Image (cartoon, helix red, strand yellow):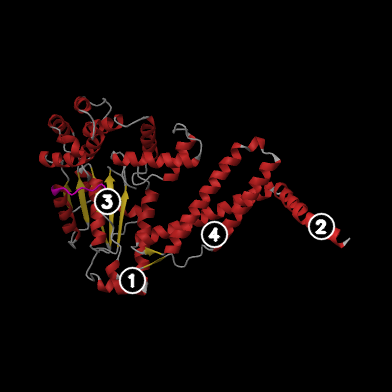
Amino acid sequence: MEIVISIAAKIAEYTVAPVGQWLCYSCHYSKNMESLKNQEKKLQNAKDRWEQSVDDALRKGEEIHSDVNKWLTEASRILRECEEKAEARSSHATCVNLKQRHRLSREANKIAGNIVKHLENGNFNPVSYLPAAQDRMVTTRHKNYVTLESRTSVANEVMEALGDANIKKIGVWGMPGVGKSTLMKEIERRAKEENLFHGVVLAAVTERPELSRIRGEIAVMLNQERHRQQTEIGRANLQQESSTKDAKSLVILDDIWPKQLELEDIGIPSEGCKVVLTSRNRDVLVREMGTQKNFELESLVEEEAWNLFEKMAGDSVKDPDVREVAIKVAKECAGLPVALTTVSKALKGKSLSIWKDAELRLKRPPPVDVPEILSPIYTCIELSYNQLADEEHKSLILLCALLDQYYGIYYQDLLKYCFGLGLFQGIVTLEEARHRLDSLVCDLRDSCLLIEG
């Protein structure tokens, strides 16, 4: 009898308990799904908070602790997994059977548990550290920045004006596509690298400025500066750096339009701050913004324009026949760096026929509703757009134009819209869409229709 009871107990252990557990998962399907949803939200909120802390630290030139980066990477992986599981659940929502309920419920319970553990490991204080003075992080040169003699000359003059204690407002003006925004990124890089100011911020204004965004960017920089001065390390560094600085902050406002804003309205203090502004119109800078020193950024001279064009086009223009047409194409770009770059990249590696067709297209007048000042750049970018490989590339660049926030387009927004609108052919999962988006964005960057950011 004892042997029989022992055998029966073993049978129960290996059958009844698993069956009970199996039914438990199925019965608690809704509860486990809701728990996963709540934990996913907590993880997303925590990830957003830590990413904001990381961004703030990087702006101050601090290094991020390795465990913080690892935590954020793992958080992104878990959230992608949640997103993919949610997609799978929604696709089978109308036909979930008992077996599927068990599997999905068990997966949800496991992922929710992993999130709880990951959140417990996500307590960082602080997220960053200030490296030694000699190891300070220096902003790297912008990927698409090309050293040009004329631009270097203007950049040096602006940097010289920044060192003049009597000059508080500096203006740079020039036509669209001449490279004002690229120059401002170079000024920002040099100002940080040379440690001229305790805080540097570059904000885009544009025709329809988001004052709250600009005010926020400036406020973050000024708050960081105040925090830095309050720390022991900050005070020591300030003593080592230039103690004779009248202006402790530099604010660069790119693309000012007529009758737009008062500096005080966006939080720029009247004292202790230098301002560099760019505009298409010199009068806007001198009369409305009161700049004391102004520099014109002119179109490239023919030789410099061709050197830039040739460098971007590469081996394509070594063929004598192509080179003859390429020189004419470069002239149609009117010495505008943006036009020269996009056109040369669009035609790189193309046949002679396509080069000749491009020359004809560039000579064609733009639509009547395009302002004259935009005519050269419009025609060149239209040509680059038409040279894109397929409709997916064209749809993506048009979507970027709709989402453009001037200095940045959110990758997650692109992914959601591309997937939701069905812009990618043959794509059925988010993972596939992510791979396709990465590939297309890379192509558009290589074509200079998108820049880093």
Task: Check the image and name the residue furthest to the right.
Answer: 1
Task: Examine the rendering and report whether any part of residue 183 can be seen.
Answer: yes
Q: Which of 283 and 176 is in front in this view?
A: 176
Looking at the picture, how far across and down is residue 384, in whole percent?
Answer: 27, 33
Which label sits on residue 142?
A: 3
Q: Nearer the viewer, residue 145 or 284?
A: 145
Of the numbered discs 2 and 3, the one sitting upstream in the chain is 2
Q: Nearer the viewer, residue 262 or 307?
A: 307
User: Circle 1 sits on which residue?
Assistant: 234
Q: Distance between the residues labelled 3 and 1?
A: 28 Å
Three-letter amino acid code at disc 2? Answer: Ile
The label nearer to you, 2 versus 1, is: 2
User: Circle 2 sits on which residue?
Assistant: 7
Which label sits on residue 331?
A: none
The label nearer to you, 4 versus 1, is: 4
Q: What stretch is highlighted in magenta?
A: 143-149
Q: In which quarter of the image is residue 304?
A: top left
Q: In which quarter of the image is residue 250?
A: bottom left
Which label sits on residue 118?
A: 4
SS of the residue at dot 2? helix
User: For mark 3, does the 10 Å Cα neighbourhood hold few (<14), some (14 to 19), or many (20 or more) residues?
Assistant: some
Contact, mark 3 vs mark 1 (Cβ under 8 Å):
no
